[in-house]
Image (cartoon, coloured by chain):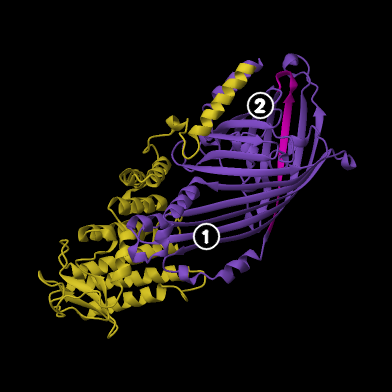
Chain colours: A yellow, B purple
Amino acid sequence: MKKTAIVLVLVLLAAIFSGCTKSTNVLAWAAPSGGSSVAASKSSGNAAFAEGNYAKAMADFNAAVAASGGVAGSPDSEARYGYVKAYCKNAGLDLAAFLKAYSGSMTPGYMGAPGQPGAGSYMLINSQTLPFGMTLSQLENLANVVIVYLKPIADGNCDGVVPKDAAGLNVNLAFAYMLDGILVVADTNQDGTLEYNLVSDTTDQKIKACAVDANNIWSSWTVSSIPGSNKTRAVGDLANAINYLNVAISKTPNGASGTMYPQVLSILQKIQTAVQGV
Amino acid sequence: MKKLLAIALILVSAASFAAAIAPFANNTRALGMGGAYTAVVNNSDSMMWNPAGTAKGSDFHIDLLDLNIETDQKTVDFLTYFINNSSVFTQNISSWTSSTISTLSNANIKLNVSDKFAITGINGFFGLGNVAVGAFAIVNANVATSYDILNINANINGSMDLVGTLNISGMIDYGLNGLFDSLLSGTRLGAGVTGKLINRWQINEVRSAFDISGLDPKTMLNKLSNPTQGYGFDLGVNLYLPAISSTVSFVGKDLFEAIGASPVNSSWNLGYGLKIAQGFVADVDVYDVLGSTTLLNKLHAGAEIDVLAGLLIVRGGLYQGYPSFGFDLLGFLKYADYGVELGTYPGQLENRYHRLSICLGL
C-alpha cells in the first residue's frame, strides 16, 4: 500500500509539472491522421489552423470539400469556410499590416507626388500600399477563392451550418467582390501590375481612377483604356458587394446606425459610380 | 484483488478521455481527478454530479461557501503579453507593430466564477429518504477577438446561472445470493433524483470591426435584466459492491431539461469507483455513453490520495487524455489544472484551465 501511494504521488507530481501550460495527450495515437472522412478532415483542419499550420489546414479542408462533392457541389459550409480561412492565412494575409498601413493612409494628403490629387484625398488602392500585406496577384487570387468557395453558402446552396445570412460570411463576400471590382479596373489585364490607382477625393466627394506611370504614381486623371468588359465585370462585382453588405447590415442587432457600415456602403456606391463613369 | 483492480485502473487511466459537461456542474475536486467523479461523489456535489451520491446518508452538513475562480491558458498568455508590453498600448496605433496588432486581434479573456450554498444530510425528512437542498450560481464571462478571413470579430459572451436544487435519495439492500455470492455479498443499490430550477441571464454578441461601434451597453444590460427560466432533472443509480470496495454508477443528466423554449440535450454517464485504501480512491467515467462524440473523448480517469490526514489531498488523472492534477490544502483551499479537448479526436486541440477554490462549511 505504501509503495503504491508513493508511486501514485510521483505520477501526480509528474503530471503537475507536465501539465502547467500545454500537455501531451496520451491518446493522441488513436486519432486518425485526417482524410479518412469528411468529419475527420474538418477536425484535423481546425486543429492545424489553431496551431498555425495553414498549409496542412488547407489540405485537410480541401480534402473535406473534395470528399463531399467538390468545389462546385459540396454542401459542407464548414469545410468551405475553413478552406478559405486557411487559404488566406497561408497566402500571407496580414490584417495587422493592413490596419497599420491604412491607419496612416486615411489621412488627407497622404500622397505627395507630382500630379497627385493633393490634400483632401484618400488612397483606396495604389501600387505602393496594397492592402493586407499581399501582392496584387495574391489579392486577385484571394478574391477569387473567397467568391468561389463562399458564394454557394450565401446563396443558400449549402447545409446551413454556416447560415447563409451570417454577417461575417456576407461581409467577407462583400469585401471579396469589392476587391475583385477594384482590381479588374486597376489591373486591367490581370497580370499583377497596376495600371490605375483609385482615390477618394474629399474635395468633390468622388472616387476617381488615375493612371500609373513609371516615374510618378499620379500622372494623370485621364483614364481612357479600361476595356468595356472590365467595366461591366467591375460594375457587377460592386453590385454584388453592395447586396452582400446589405445582408450583413440586416443582421446587425440594432441596425446600421452608429456603425461603420453606412460609410463602407457609401464608398462602394461611389466606386461603382466612378467605374461606370470612366 | 484490490491490487489487481488498482493496477487495471491505472492502466486504463493511461488511455482515457471525456466530453464537455454543464459548466455549473463542474467541481474542483472532480477536475483534479480528470473529471472522473461519478462513482466517488458523496457530498453536496452529488446534487449536480450524481444524485445517488447522497443515498448512503451522511451527517448534517452546510456548505456556506464554495467559491471557484477559473480561467484558461489563453487568458494567462494574453494577460502576460499585455503586462509585458503595457507601454505600447498608450501609443498611437500607427506606432504599433504588426505583432502587437496580431496579438490583439486574436485575444481572449475568460473568467468563470461560481459559488454554492448547500445543506445535506437532512435524513429521514418526511420519510422520503435522504434530502439535500442547494443553490448554485456561476458567472461566465468571455471577451475574445478573432480573425474572420477579411474581417476581425469581437465576441462578447456572458451568462449567469442560478440553479436551485432539491435532491432526494435512498438505499435498498440488493440481497443477491448464489453463484457470485462472494463478489456480490452485501451489495446495495442506491438511487437519487435531483430537481433543478434554473434562472439564466445571458448575453451573446458577435461584432465585426465595422459594427462594433454600434454596440449599445444599455441594450446589453437590458438583456441581462431579463432572465430565462428553466427546469430539469438528474437521475442517478449506484450499485455498491463492498466485497471489492467498488461502486458502479449510472447517471442521467439534464433529463427533460429546457431553458426557456430551448431544450437541453440530455446525456447518460457511466462511472466505476474503487476504494483502494482509506483515503485512497480512484474512478473511471465514460461521459455521454449514448452520444455521437468520439469514444476516446468521453473517457476520464483519476485518483485521489490523502497524504496528510486531510490537510493535504493530492489528485491526478486524465481528462480526455490530457493530464490533470489538483490538491486540497488545509481543508479549505483547492486547486485543479486540466486540459479539455476541443477537437473531435484526442490530442488535436487542447484548451487548458486553471481553477482555484475556497471552501467553508459547518
Give, as a single range, the part of the protein colored magenta: B229-245
Task: Name the residue located 45 percent from the left edge and 59 percent from the top edge.
Answer: A163
Give above or below for A58 relative to B86.
above
Quadrant placement of the C terminus of chain A: bottom left
Mark 1 element type:
strand
Query: Which mark is on residue B307?
Result: 2
Q: Is residue B136 visible?
A: yes
Task: Name the residue located 48 percent from the left edge and 52 percent from the top edge.
Answer: B79
Quadrant placement of the N terminus of chain A: top right
Q: Which residue is mark 1?
A: B156
Label 1 crowding class (10 Å Cα cut-off): few <14, some 14-19, many 20+? Answer: some
Relative to B353, A199 lies left or right: left
User: Which one is in front, B237 or B39?
Assistant: B39
Give above or below for A92 relative to A40.
below
Using the rendered view, name the quadrant where residue A272 is placed: bottom left
Query: Which mark is on residue B113?
Result: none
Task: Name the residue located 78 percent from the left edge and 17 percent from the top edge.
Answer: B177
Q: Chain of mark 1?
A: B
Q: Chain of mark 2?
A: B
User: Which one is in front, B80 or B198?
Assistant: B80
Residue B104 point in image, percent of width and height: 42, 57
User: Which amino acid, by three-letter code, is at mark 1?
Assistant: Ile
Label 2 crowding class (10 Å Cα cut-off): few <14, some 14-19, many 20+? Answer: some
Q: Residue furthest bottom?
A: A204
Prevalent SS, magenta region: strand
**Alpha-carbon span between mark 1 and mark 2:** 43 Å
Mark 2 element type:
loop
